[in-house]
Amino acid sequence: MTLDKAKELLAVQVSMGGGYNRNGAKLILLEVQKDHGQSAVDRLIRELGLEAKFGFKPGESLFGG
């Protein structure tokens, strides 16, 4: 997945909010992590305000929670 596509998909999740959308965002971030690494995930978390919206923290492992 490209970073532009991930950003587009995450923006949709953010606009809808809610628990199911948090799970959707997590799956997108896991795919980004697999393809581009943790630094790309951290950038998206910061750029899109995912810490405030869904509680994702830069540098935090997305696995197991």
Image (cartoon, rainbow, N blue to C red):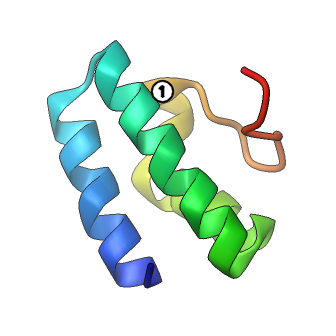
Q: Residue at x 48, y 61 (%)?
A: 47
Q: Which residue is identified by label 1?
A: 54
Q: Quadrant of the N terminus?
A: bottom left
Q: Position of residue 55 (x, y in %)?
A: 58, 25
Q: Position of residue 44 (x, y in %)?
A: 53, 62
Q: Is residue 26 above or below residue 10?
A: above
Judge from the rendering whether residue 41 lies leftward or rightward of residue 14; answer left or right: right
Total marks in image:
1
Q: Position of residue 40 (x, y in %)?
A: 66, 72
Q: Residues within 10 Å of mark 1 (few under 14, many from 20)?
A: some
Judge from the rendering whether residue 41 lies leftward or rightward of residue 44; answer left or right: right
Q: Residue at x 48, y 27 (%)?
A: 54
Judge from the rendering whether residue 21 lies leftward or rightward of residue 57; answer left or right: left
Q: For the residue marked with disc 1, what is the amino acid?
A: Phe
Q: Is residue 30 above or below residue 3?
A: above
SS at mark 1 in the image: helix
Can residue 52 be seen here? The reply is yes
| Depth check, front residue: 19 or 34 | 34
Can residue 46 be seen here? The reply is no
Q: Quadrant of residue 53?
A: top left
Q: Is residue 10 above or below residue 14?
A: below
Q: Quadrant of residue 60?
A: top right
Q: Position of residue 64 (x, y in %)?
A: 79, 25
Farthest residue toward the top? 19
